[in-house]
Structure formats: C-alpha cells, structure tokens
Image (spheres, rainbow, N blue to C red):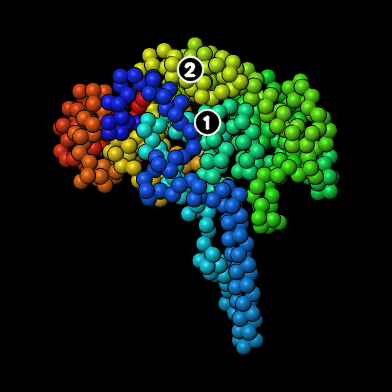
Amino acid sequence: MGPRPGSIAAIEADPRGALIAELERSPSGQVAASALPSSSLPSSALPSSSRAFRTVADANAKRQARTIVATRAQDEAKRQQMSEASSMVEGAGQDGNEMAAKIAADAVPDPGRPIYLEEAKLRTETALNAEIGFTERLVWFWSNHFCVSADKIQSMSGAYEREAIRPHVLGRFADMLLAAEGHPAMLFYLDNTASMGPNSIAGINRNRGLNENFARETLELHTLGVRSGYSQDDVISFANVLTGWTLVPPGDNPEHGGEFTFNPRLHEPGAKTVMGKVYEDEGVEQGRAVLRDLAAHPATATHLATKLARHFVSDTPPAPLVEKMAKAFLDTGGDLKETAKVMVASAESWTQTPTKLKRPSEWVVGIVRATGITQVDPVRFTAGQALLGEPLWRPSSPKGFPDDEASWIDGIGRRLDVANNFAERVADKVDPHDVIEAVFGSTVSAEVKETVGRAESRQQALALLFMSAELQRR
C-alpha cells in the first residue's frame, strides 16, 4: 500500500520475509478492529448486504408512497381551484408532480449514499492503518477481479467486498468463486435475477427467457479467460445452469429480502453439458459443480496467475513467474495464500525495475500513508478517486479497472491537481524533509531530495514529493 513512517526501515533487511510473514499472520482479509483508529466503525457495525438492500428498498417504497399521497393532494387542490376559476396555467399538473416527488425525496432521503460512504471510510482507513498492506492489496485485487458497480447496486457494494472477497483472499479460489458468483450483488449486477430458463415454469408462464451475461462474464473474466476453449454453446448451456440463482425480493419478504435464493421455478430443467462434461440437474448444486470445475481448470490457473503478476510485478509479467504461480495454484488446489507466497519468493518479482505506474486508488492511499494520516473524510476521498478516473466500486464494465500504464498515464495532470490540493491541506502539519527521512530513508533518490530542497514553500515541496517516481511507481 506504500510506505508509512518507519515501515521501510522495519522490513528493508528482509522484504520478502516481511511480506510472507504478513500473509501468515493475517486473519484472511478480515478487518481487525484493533487495526483501525477509534473513530472508525468496525465492520460488524455496518449492515449486511441484504439488510442494506432492504433499507434502501424500504426507503424507496416510502418515498413512492409519499409521492403518490402528495400528488393526490395536489390533484384534489387543483380540482377545487378549477371549480372556482375558469382556467388554469397549462403544465401546472406536471410541475405539481415534480414538486410532489421533490417533497417525498426530501422527507425520505436515500440511505444508500450514507451506507456507501461508511463502507468507503472503513476500506480506506483499513488500508491506511495496515502495517505493510500486502494482504489489503490482495483484497483490492480480488475485489476488482470480481467487481460489481455501485452505480447499479450502491447499497451492497461495500458489504459485497466484506462478505464475498475478504474472507477468502488467503483461502481457496473455489470458495471465493462460489461466494462471489452466489452473492446477490453479483447476481443483480450481471442481470441473472432477470434470467429464466425458456422451459422453466416461470419462463413458460411469462414468455421470457435466458440472459447470458452472468455466464459469459464468469467464463471470460472470472475463470478461464478469453480464447480458452469454451464456445458459445458452452455459454448458453452454463447460463441455463445458472437460471434460478437470484435474490429474495425485498417487497415480498421484509426479513430476508436481498438474500440469495435458488428459485426452482426459474431454473431450466434437465442435464446440461458445459465444456464436454455433463452435469445432472441437481438444482443449485448443478451450478456449484460447474463453478468448482472451472476453478480447478488449468486455463483458470494461467489466467489468474497472469493477472496477479501483472498487477503486482509488471505490465508484461515474466513468463517463468506466471508459470510458477499457475503451477502452485494447481498443485495446491487453488490455494491463494500459497500462490501469493510463490509470487513473493520468485526472483522474477524482484528483478523488475520499479516502473509500474500505480493506479489512482493506490497512489492516493500511498501519499496519505506517507504523511502518517490514518483517518479520512469519505466524501472528499471518494470525490478525489472519481476525479482521477477510478471511482470507488464503480468500474465502467465487468472487466474492472485496468492494470496497465497506458490506461492511466493520461491522468497524470489530474494527479498534480490532487497533489497540490492535499499538500495545501497538510502543509502546516507535515514536513516534507521528515517524510523523506522517516518514510523513504535510503530508498529515495538524490534527484528527489534535491528537487524538494529547492522548493519555494513546504506546500510545493510536498506536492513535488507526492508526484515523484517514489510515490507514482512501484
């Protein structure tokens, strides 16, 4: 996550050993309350994804009801006015409806936004307080790999990461795959809640059918990767397997709305063949069986090893490193901790020059960590990430945010704006020379020291330091 005061000095004698030691002592990717400032809410205080979903659904229902009541009252007032006057101003009805909607919105504010901000605060402060942050970076990597979008499912976006990703980042990939694909946020995001088998009870009665989106993205993005041997027939068959994977409608069940459920009325009946293997119709277990086989496939191992190495090591990861990681993945049954340890222990991970450009989220957390600050305003922080082109939990597509320099290099100018703004806010509390000595120590270049030393003000010196290669690249 980037150095903070004293962290480089603590690990520079054996950085590989320090990273592996963090993996060994991390309680999966869970957020420990002791690792957060006292002002932060523990994860246990935040609502579950289903509860957050119900909270927003309830607010929407109340808002709709208030709008209807207000509109009725305005319509009644309009009728009374019409009985007393010969004409009305054209368009008043429409204005009245808009006013009714505004009154309802003011009376019942959207709870999704505050939930999102509390989740963002917890996530960010967890990263700022991490001793090294390797495990937390793994959380970020896998969350982006199995991404959902807060633009479509804001209320669940943070809880999804806590529930489906964090518990499994140091466990087995198959368990994470099952947790992510079976999570209501993913099913909603990739439209599986609208998918039904054409020969299912619901499909016949409603004259509706299959949505292939969820199956296609699971194969192409989450497991095998592109051009890995599956066909369009496999996509269709897998989509049929996944019919019935949905969530409980909150309006139908105020206690369990938003939770995962398998609805057999939506499920396409019969055995299905996916990539040459026949899977008998066992309801929800049919889909889980396919997912377990996809998790163990050699193409999945190569796809995931390549993405991990590209994220942590180089835009063009060394083939020997990818091969070692893929082999470790297969040999250990998809053990993600062991795969990460092989990446850390491999010489190829340390011989690359530190030229990889950090993504905006990494860079922003990195500059804040360098100052020793451990608490943030989530409104300001999420706005800054959005300005830099990586809004939190809001990728533009199911592919997630890219990990190559070409995708981010054009945004360097916006980083300068953020660096100047942050430097202005902390200049009275943070000495750039102290940051150089206490944070970077012997790893900082002479050029950076000289540049910072020539700065005309502390604010300018900090901004130059934040924009240096030491903080922009890794």
Quick one: label 1, few (<14), some, or many (20+) residues within 10 Å? Answer: many
| Rendered view: 309 above or below 365 | above
Say if residue 302 shows up in the picture. Answer: no
**Chain-order first, disc 2 or disc 1:** 1
- The percent coordinates of residue 288 (x first, y second) are 70, 32
Q: Which residue lies at the image location 38% right of the left edge and 16% below the top edge?
A: 350
In this rendered view, identify the residue nearer to me: 344 or 362: 344
Between 339 and 446, the one lying in front of the other is 339
Residue 169's disc is 1
Question: Which residue shows up at 80% across the image and 45% down it?
Answer: 265
Residue at the spot x=69%, y=52% of the render? 249
Quadrant (top left/top right/bottom left/bottom right) for the C terminus: top left
Seen from the viewer's position, the closer of residues 86 and 8 is 8
Q: Quadrant of residue 333?
A: top right
Task: Identify which amino acid the numbered label 1 is placed on.
Answer: Val
The furthest residue to the bottom: 84
What is the C-alpha distance between the residues marked 2 and 1?
15 Å
Residue 178 position (above or below residue 108):
above
Q: Is residue 188 above or below residue 409?
A: below
Give SS at disc 1. Answer: loop
Quarter assignment of residue 76:
bottom right
Q: Secondary structure at mark 2?
A: helix
Q: Which quadrant is the N terminus positioned in?
A: top left
Q: Cβ–Cβ below 8 Å for labels 2 and 1?
A: no
Query: Any mark on residue 342, and which?
Result: 2
User: Where is residue 314 shown, x and y percent of the image?
Assistant: 43, 20
Neighbour class for label 2 at 10 Å: few (<14), some, many (≥20)?
many
